[in-house]
Amino acid sequence: MIRGWPLELLGLAALLVVALIVGWIAGQVGLALFVAAACNLGWHLINLYRLERWLSHGRRFDAPRSWGVWHSIFEHYYQQRRRERERKREFVQLLREIRESTTAMPDGVVLMNQVGEIRWLNQTAGRLLHLRVPQDIGQRLPNLVRHPDFIRYLNARDYAEPVELSAPSARGLHLSLRIVPYGENQQMLLVRDSTRLHRLEQMRREFVANASHELRSPLTVMSGYLESMGEDDKLRVAWGKPLDAMRQQTARMTAIVSDLLELSRLETESREAPYAPVDVGVLTKRIREAALSLGEGPPGIKLELDGNLQLLGAERELYSAFSNLVFNAMKYTPADGQVTVTWTGDASGAAFAVTDTGIGIPAAHIPRLTERFYRVDKSRHRDSGGTGLGLAIVKHVLQHHGARLEIESEPGRGSRFTCRFGPERVNRNGERSGTS
Ligand code: ADP
């Protein structure tokens, strides 16, 4: 069957032939050709009109019937529209399925635009965050969820980890909130009920704290008796070696118990550390004395301290963190090595660093050093008498102060542990400065 342009041209040719014949018979060839051209123009105008009406009244689905090239045009448009409608139907269906599945999800989902206004939320998010639909749609989320931890999390713009907070909707309910950026500056908030996890964590903490507390009294009794037995000359003759071993092990257990208690205390106190002025110079000198009395490592510790810099924090916690770093440096550095403590500042804050020329740490172990009971070399560790909890304590103390721990080390050459504090934790008082 001939279609489209060939048919159109054939029809035009036929019209011209007929016009020529009729014009020739009537002796009016010009007029006949004019009438033929006018008819052809009229035909195209009628079809243009039908096309325009069909396109503007898009709801009517059937394409107008026509002939020649107009038939092809109508047919093309019709097929295109049919495909578009099918695609649209599929999208709507997909959207409906996504909405239904997110509505049924046990986790809350809130979609926000570039300026943090709520565009959509599922039932769980509404229930957990106490949001209402449709009243709260279009409202800014920070105006509705005003928990200070959440506002801090939003402002920090670091969404790698979720933020934990107590639910605004019910007492005892704990939530884990996480922002997931997507598209062009759009954000999705995922809300999860973390009450069970929170309770388990609390139970774990309480268990460790109670167990450590209960172990303290029997350990004190045992060390007391072992001490007295060690002083008894008759007993020492037969039991000298076992008594020393028992004393050493009870001392280790006592150290572990006291570190565990310290860690539990730090964990339960999740608040930010206070901003009380701490004289790092005095603190470091106290730590140096205590470290040198341990009788391990080099005979001296070099101090390079900027006396103009005051640290704002919790002195007891800072003593615990800094002393752990200095004691470690002494423990893992031979007598002919060097341990240096520096306290310096610049526009970005201040740094307390402990550098040693000791045995160093292989790179693979560094990311895991702050885990509880993590040891680089277990046999070496037992000899060193460490608890494996020191760096975990350091990490917690620094978290309380919004600071971070940086560890650089090279096996055989030494290590540097740096505590970096933000400018809000530093006071410049323009007084003493000292090196010794
Ligand atoms: P420990 O009580 O065993 O010292 P820590 O948590 O303080 O426990 O340290 C964890 C591990 O990190 C240690 O067992 C040790 O292997 C390694 N370590 C810490 N500080 C140093 C250092 N200054 N030099 C070499 N190794 C270190």
Image (spheres, rainbow, N blue to C red):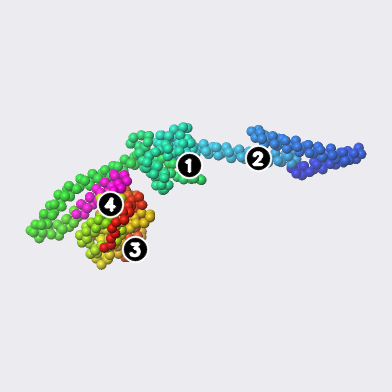
For the point 33% across and 58% down, which residue is it? 344
Dot 2 alpha-carbon crowd within 10 angstroms: few under 14, some 14 to 19, many 20 or more: few
Q: Which residues are magenta?
A: 251-278
Quarter containing the C terminus: bottom left
Say what amino acid the circle numbered 3 marks.
Glu
Cα distance in 3D space between marks 1 and 4: 41 Å
Give the label on residue 410, or none: 3
Label number found at residue 79: 2
Question: Mark 4 highlights which residue?
Answer: 278
Badge 2 amino acid:
Gln
Question: How far separated are the C-alphas under marks 1 and 2?
Answer: 41 Å
Q: Label 3, label 1: how many angstroms apart (C-alpha)? A: 47 Å
Label drawn at residue 115? 1
Callout 1 secondary element? loop
Label 4 or label 2, whichever comes before in sequence order: 2
Q: Is residue 129 left or right of residue 53?
A: left
